[in-house]
């Protein structure tokens, strides 16, 4: 019985909420940084990086949600 309760807690995670526009994402997570998540590559870009907001296979999301969903941060193009 205890094992089943542990499994239920393990499954619960922060849901990833993608947005089309940066302002929508910022309203959703006012205390967090908004990033551009590239679903095809499995990485996210911070504001100021070359690929931020670029491409057809991505959305704006909260950085914490992206990290909790196991997407990784891109280190390329930091300014």
Image (cartoon, rainbow, N blue to C red):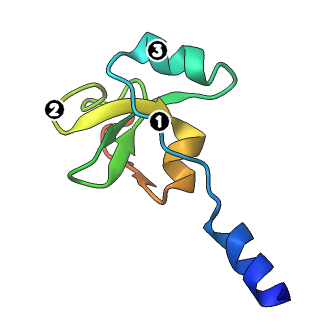
| Label 2 – label 1 distance at C-alpha | 18 Å
Determine if residue 79 is in view.
no
Residue 1 sits above or below residue 17 on the image: below
- Element under disc 2: loop
Give residue 33's quadrant in the image.
Answer: top right
Q: Which residue is mark 2?
A: 55
Q: Mark 3 or mark 2: which is in front?
A: 3
Q: How many marks?
A: 3
Q: Are marks 3 and 2 in contact (CB under 8 Å)?
A: no
Q: Residue at x 65, y 60 (%)?
A: 12
| Label 3 – label 2 distance at C-alpha | 18 Å
Q: Residue at x 26, y 29 (%)?
A: 50
- Element under disc 1: loop
Residue 56 sits above or below residue 44 on the image: above
Q: Are marks 1 and 3 in contact (CB under 8 Å)?
A: no
Residue 31 is labelled as: none
Residue 27 location in percent, x, y?
A: 57, 14
Give residue 45's quadrant in the image.
Answer: top left
Q: Which residue is mark 1?
A: 17
Chain-order first, disc 1 or disc 3: 1
Q: Residue at x 48, y 21 (%)?
A: 25
Determine if residue 45 is in view.
yes
- Element under disc 3: helix
Residue 24 is labelled as: 3
Residue 44 location in percent, x, y?
A: 38, 43
Q: Is residue 13 left or right of residue 70?
A: right
Q: Are marks 2 and 1 in contact (CB under 8 Å)?
A: no
Q: Is residue 48 left or right of residue 11?
A: left
Give residue 46's quadrant in the image.
Answer: top left
Q: Is residue 51 left or right of residue 79?
A: left
Residue 42 location in percent, x, y?
A: 31, 55
């Amino acid at each position: 019985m205890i094992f089943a309760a542990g499994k239920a807690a393990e499954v619960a995670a922060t849901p990833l909420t993608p947005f089309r526009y940066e302002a929508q994402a910022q309203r959703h997570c006012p205390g967090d940084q908004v990033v551009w998540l590239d679903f095809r590559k499995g990485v996210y870009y911070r504001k100021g990086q070359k690929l931020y907001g670029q491409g057809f296979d991505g959305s704006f999301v909260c950085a914490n949600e992206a990290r909790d969903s196991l997407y990784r941060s891109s280190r390329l193009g930091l300014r």
